[in-house]
Amino acid sequence: MDKVAVLMNKNAGKGQLADSQQAIAKVLESRFAEVVFYDMAQFSDRTKAILQILKQFDLVIIAGGDGTVHEVVNIVAPLPHRPTLAIIPAGTANDFSRQINMPQDPIEAAQTILALKKQSVDIGKTEQRYFVNFWGIGLITQASQSIDARSKQNIGKLAYYLQAIQSVGQVTPFKLTLQTQDKVIEDQAVMVIIGNGSYTGGVRALLPKANISDGLFEVLVIKEASIQTVLSILQSRKASVDHQELEGVIALQTHCLSISTEPSQTIDCDGESDGQTPTEIVVLPKHIEMIVGE
């Protein structure tokens, strides 16, 4: 692996990438023969530009936050021949980079990439998009939409959870029909989250046991707009919580499922708003090769 492209979102997080670019370049150039940096903000057609870059390099490093990772993965995932990907995190929560054990300091992440430790990871596929970390409707979508840019910058990863807690009493339950290969769930719910990874908003709260290489989703259905239930789930970042024992919660594992709701719900994929229900969702096992940390 000699040729490396770095796709940079200099606006991610607090703009720290722009300040770190020279130091990151020095680290990467100590190991790779050719390192080329691309400012994604300069692309007039981002998809077309990234597709051209993917053809030219052995390793493509995504330097940015969860939104940038989501964007690039959605360009890479449909390709028959996919380059190895790596992440230099620079966003608010950096959920997937945490999942693959990348240091959250950009320069330390660059140093970790030099070891070229690889892992083939699962991703999720819907009728609309691909996702690496989570798919959600209901409370989690409302919380994400309600967080303003200043809140994300000032509070960072805690903003997601603070807003979620504040939103509990504002959510109207919806009628859910969830079907897997061996069961059908019909119930009222306020949130559904399907986890490929275990991090949401920077901490392992909602789905601490999710595994990105087991070919399975962790599915969590919250049936009641209960502050006690939500807080119990948040506490799982400190202690292992059995979701089956939580009142108003349905938990299961599956590799594929379909979801419909009444009324239709806005979908959140990896923190990005993406279409409406109904939809079908499937795991693509070990679909993308990533550079991971220890």
Image: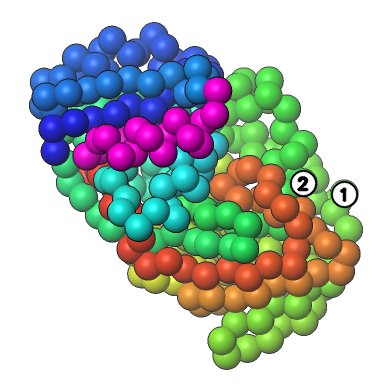
Region rendered in magenta:
44-63
Q: Is residue 250 magenta?
A: no
Image point (50%, 36%), residue name: 47
**Can residue 94 be seen here?**
no
User: Would you name the residue on which mark 1 appears?
Assistant: 170
- In the rendered view, does 117 fall on the left or right side of 290? left
Q: Position of residue 254 (x, y in %)?
A: 51, 77
Query: Which of the pair 36/26 is nearer the observer?
Result: 36
For label 2, the SS is helix
Q: Position of residue 118 (x, y in %)?
A: 21, 50
Q: How did the renderer colour the structure? A: rainbow
Image point (50%, 61%), residue name: 124
Q: Position of residue 178 (x, y in %)?
A: 69, 77
**Can residue 120 be seen here?**
yes
User: Would you name the residue on which mark 2 appears?
Assistant: 142
Q: Position of residue 84 (x, y in %)?
A: 27, 45
Name the kind of residue labelled 1 in the image: Gln
Q: Disc 2 vs disc 1: Cβ atoms closer than 8 Å? A: yes
Tell me the mark number nearer the camera, choosing from 2 and 1. 2
